[in-house]
Image (cartoon, rainbow, N blue to C red):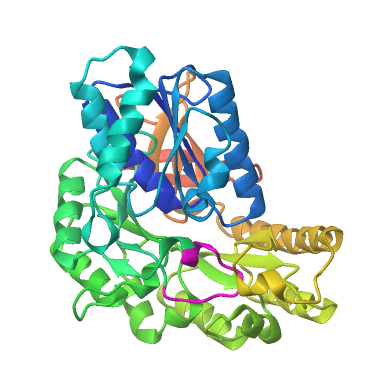
Amino acid sequence: MKAAFYTLGCKLNQVETEALVSAFREQGVSIVSSDNQADIYVVNTCTVTSKSEQKARRMIRKFSRDNNSSLVIATGCYVQMEEEEVLSLGDNVVTVSLDDKDTILDLAAFIGSYRFDLRELKSRTALWLQEHLATSKPDGGERFRYSPADFNFHSRAFLKIQDGCDNSCAYCRVTIARGASVSLDSDEIINRLNQLAGKGYREVVLTGINIDSYQSGDLDLAGLLKKILEETRGFRIRLSSLEPDTLTEQMCGVLADERICPHFHLSVQSGSDVILKAMRRNYTSETIREAVRQLRVVKDDPFIAADIIAGFPGETESDLEESMKIITELNFARAHVFPFSPRPGTEAYDITPKVPERETVLRAARLRKASEESYKSYISRSIGKEAVILLEHCDDNGLWYGFSETYIRFAVENVDKGAQAGQMAVCKIKDLSAGTGSAVFHKFQ
C-alpha cells in the first residue's frame, strides 16, 4: 500500500499533513512523493487566492485522471468552501471537511488493519469514511489531534496551538472556512513541547491561523510564551505570522528572550490607512511603525518580513505609494507581495472600483522591487556575523544546508564529520549574494 500527500497553503496545513504522514507510516503504509504512483492521494487544499484553488483543482484532477484505480482524498479550506466543485473533478475523489479532517488519522488505522483487495480500495474506504463522518463530534471535531510523532519533511518541529479566526477582514475567505478561534490548552502545549524536546528537536515553530488570538483560561499569547520559557528547555522557538496591533511593549518584552528567534513575519497588508480601514484591519500605519520599532528595541537587527496585498479595490496610486513607503522606511528584510484575489463570499468581492488585473500585477512588481532593495540592505549587514544554523540535510559533496535563527538559508562549509540533521551549528556568515548564502562552520551548539 502506497500513499502520497500534496499540500497547498499555510504552515498549519503543512503541520496537519505531517501528522497524517506519520499516522499512515505507523500503519505500515509506504509514503511516496506525489509524482509517483500511489494507491491513495491526500490533497490538503487552500482557499486564500484563486490561484491556490486553481492549483488544487489541477492536482486533484491530475491524480484522479492518471490513477483512476486509486483513491483521491481532498480536504482543507477549499474543500470546505466548494465541496461539490471538488467532487466533480473525478469519480475516484472523496472529500473530507475541515471539522472532520482528523478522521483521516483514523483512516490510516483502518487501512493498516484491513488487508482487502486493492481493487476494492475506493469503495471500502469511501464507505468507511461515510460511516465515520456521519458520527457526530462535539465542538466540530478534534482540531488538535494533529501532533505528529516525527516530522517527515523538516528537521524543525511544528506545533499547532490555535485554529480559526475571529477577525472579519474584508478580503479573507479562510475565516469563513475555519470558523471562530479555538486554542489548545496551555498545559497540553507544554506536554507536547517537552515530548518534542525529548525526541531531540532543537527548534519548534508555534503555528495556527491567527496565533495572536490565542487564549487558554487567562493566558494570552504573551502569557503562553512566558509559560513555555519557564517550563521547557533545550529548543529555540519560532513564531508564525503576527498582527502589528498585538506587538505591545509587554509582548515585545517576552519576545526579547534569547530562545525566541529574531525572525518575525507581520501581517501588514497595506501601508495606507485608507486601505487598511477598507480591509477592516484593526490597526493603522502608525501601529505598524510602532510594532517594528518595539521589535528592534528588544532584538538586535531582527529579520522582519511583511505580507502586502497589491491592488485592493479602491487602491489609488497614492495608496500604493504609502505601501512602497512603509517597505522602504521600515526597511523590511522581505515583503511577501500578493496581488489581490477576489474571493467569493467576502466583502471585498463586491467593493468597487476594481483595480484592473494587469495594473495589479504591475503594482505587485513595483512592491517586490522595493522589497528586493530592502533585502539586499539587510543581508549586507549580516556578512561577517555569527549565525546559529539548524542543519537540515547534506548533499553528495558533504555540504550541509540549513536555516539560521533569522530564517535565512545557508550552505555550510567545513562541517565536522559525524554531523547529523537537527544539530545546531555556530557559523560565520561568508556571503549572502545568492538565494542561498554561504557560511563556515565554527562549532556545534
342 sits to left or right of 191: right
Tell me where residue 271 appears, x and y as whole percent: 67, 78
Which residue: 40% across, 66% down?
179
- For the residue pair 286 and 112, the one nearer the viewer reads as 112
- Quarter of the image for residue 422 reads top left
Q: Is residue 11 above or below residue 34?
A: below
Q: Is residue 38 magenta?
A: no
Which residue: 42% across, 48% down?
13
81 sits to left or right of 364: left
Tell me where residue 345 appears, x and y as whole percent: 59, 67
Which residue: 47% across, 46% down?
428
Q: Is residue 118 visible?
A: yes
- Quarter of the image for residue 405 reads bottom left
Q: Is residue 397 above or below residue 345?
A: above
The N terminus sits in image quarter = top left
Which residue: 58% across, 23% down?
65
- For the residue pair 225 and 62, the one nearer the viewer reads as 62
- For the residue pair 439 and 156, the one nearer the viewer reads as 156
Tell me where residue 416 appears, x and y as whole percent: 35, 29
Tell me where residue 239 appears, x and y as whole percent: 39, 61
The segment highlighted magenta reads 166-176
Q: Is residue 404 above or below residue 281?
A: above
Q: Is residue 13 above or below residue 413?
A: below
Label tally: 0
- For the residue pair 371 and 69, the one nearer the viewer reads as 69
Q: Main secondary structure of the magenta part?
A: loop
Q: Is residue 247 visible?
A: no
